[in-house]
Amino acid sequence: MDTEVVVVGAGPVGLMVAAELRLAGVDVVVLERLAEPAPHPKALGLHARTLEQLAMRGLAGPFLSGGARIPAWHFGFLSEKVDLTRLDSPYPFLLAFPQHRTEAILAGRARELGARIVRGEAVTGLAPTGVSVRVGTEGRSWEAGWVVGADGAGSTVRKAAGIGFPGTDADTWAYLGDVRADAAPEPGYGVQNEKGALIVAPLPDGLRRFTGFDPARQDPAHRGLTLDELEETVTRISGVDFGLRDPEWLTTFGNATRVAADYRRGRVLLAGDSAHMHFPAGGVGLNLGLQDAMNLGWKLAAVVQGRAPDALLDTYGAERRPWGEDVAEHTLAQTALITATNPTGQALRALLSGLVRTLPDLSLLLARRLSALDVHYPVPGAHPLVGTRVAEAPLADGRPLVEGKTVIRPDGYVWWATDGDETPPDLGVAFGG
Ligand SMILES: Cc1cc2nc3c(=O)[nH]c(=O)nc-3n(C[C@H](O)[C@H](O)[C@H](O)COP(=O)(O)OP(=O)(O)OC[C@H]3O[C@@H](n4cnc5c(N)ncnc54)[C@H](O)[C@@H]3O)c2cc1C
């Protein structure tokens, strides 16, 4: 055996899984096909639940000190933004923080904890042997007890494991330009009208991301984007000439939406975009994946080290897959709102914006959904607190915590609770203590 676990993909999710495994002392190798990290940030934001979980590991500091706090964010580009300041979290905001910086912090953390990250190693297939999995790459093969596929939406691991990826193909295309602007609008600027949709998000070093939907550029045969095309689209939709220049990244992306049929097949597990893909509306995809990693890491470590039965790993997909489907559903709904440029759609949007403005509880409900504070893992028949979220808990060592009459899991959810005099079962010893 070359290692206990191979993680395929050194994106944010693979790196987080590797760090969590190392925290428990599991031997882990991360195989990444790219020789160097990708230069352009896809995700731009970290939501409240992700920040809570990073804080539990003592990791929130570099993120909080290096990102801007955005108090309200878009749901479906509605004109009324969703108020994040009322979230019941120590982090009632969206933190603007580009993905490549997140990856650099997580790579540093994984390495510091002892993970081996091998770059330029593209995985080509898997061969399960019963007690291990052979992971084939272009150059050699690695034998591991377990494999985590964190290799993105086109996942080789998912395909090799024979796990289906049902859902819908892209029928809508968005534009994206990371550029400088002579007349930059304030961060969070957004417009949606009969001509299309645009939001502007902040990036470091004076860059801005101009992104949105242009109904006039939906030809599937023309998927490139030039600076002139971006400028024309943005000016036509917003009515403002921002003087766009110095592009760093110009691209288009679609709204294909899929959730893996299973998150586990034997000794192979999926996490992040390999398990779910969707339109990046609301800025939730990376967050969803990091929360997968937090759920999976301690469970896989406990099973690898013989401290928990194999069945604990089945709870990973049982708990996380419904939340992947939840995100697939609300990002499809947001896509419908973003692309609603005809009079009927405009009327629907005006109605919904009015409701979000006048019903603070609706705004809060949408804010909790975007920020994943509504995620919970109920256990039928158990105490009602079991599976509920704990916002703040010192879980830096990744082990369960006994707090009065509750036991808190390493990913920050109540695991056991009582109203009576019972003492907690020895879950710490069984599953990670
Ligand atoms: C334009 C855009 C904007 C977005 N904005 C946001 C946002 O604001 N907020 C948000 O939360 N999310 C956002 N997302 C989504 C977010 O970027 C993804 O959810 C996130 O990157 C998923 O991380 P991951 O680690 O699962 O996968 P990835 O980031 O895709 O990483 C997978 C890694 O696996 C490697 N790999 C692939 N195949 C192999 C192989 N065969 N062998 C070895 N390595 C392999 C890849 O090179 C890559 O490094 C956005 C996405 C896009 C496209």
Image (tube, helix red, strand yellow):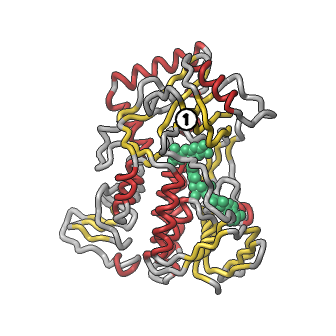
Say which quarter of the image contains residue 85.
Answer: top left
Q: In the displayed image of the protein, which residue is found farthest to the bottom? A: 1
Q: Is residue 44 visible?
A: yes
Q: Quadrant of the N terminus?
A: bottom right
The residue that appears at 59% across and 72% down in the rendered structure is: 117
Residue 233 to residue 224: above or below: above
The residue that appears at 51% across and 32% down in the rendered structure is: 200
Q: Secondary structure at mark 1?
A: strand
Amino acid type, callout 1: Arg
State the residue position of label 1: 180
Residue 11 to residue 205: above or below: below
Asked whether 338 or 381 is in front, the reply is: 338
Residue 411 to residue 422: above or below: above
**Residue 259, image x, y percentages:** 62, 50
Q: In the displayed image of the protein, which residue is found farthest to the top? A: 343
**Residue 263, image x, y percentages:** 60, 61
**Residue 256, image x, y percentages:** 67, 42
**Residue 208, image x, y percentages:** 52, 37
Asked whether 220 or 324 is in front, the reply is: 220
Say which quarter of the image contains residue 274.
Answer: bottom right
The residue that appears at 44% across and 33% down in the rendered structure is: 187
Asked whether 155 or 423 is in front, the reply is: 155
- Count of marks overlaid on the render: 1
Q: Is residue 327 visible?
A: no
Label 1 Cα neighbours within 10 Å, binned few <14 / some 14-19 / many ≥20 = many
Residue 221 to residue 48: above or below: above
The residue that appears at 68% across and 34% down in the rendered structure is: 173
Answer with left or right where residue 389 lies relative to residue 13. left
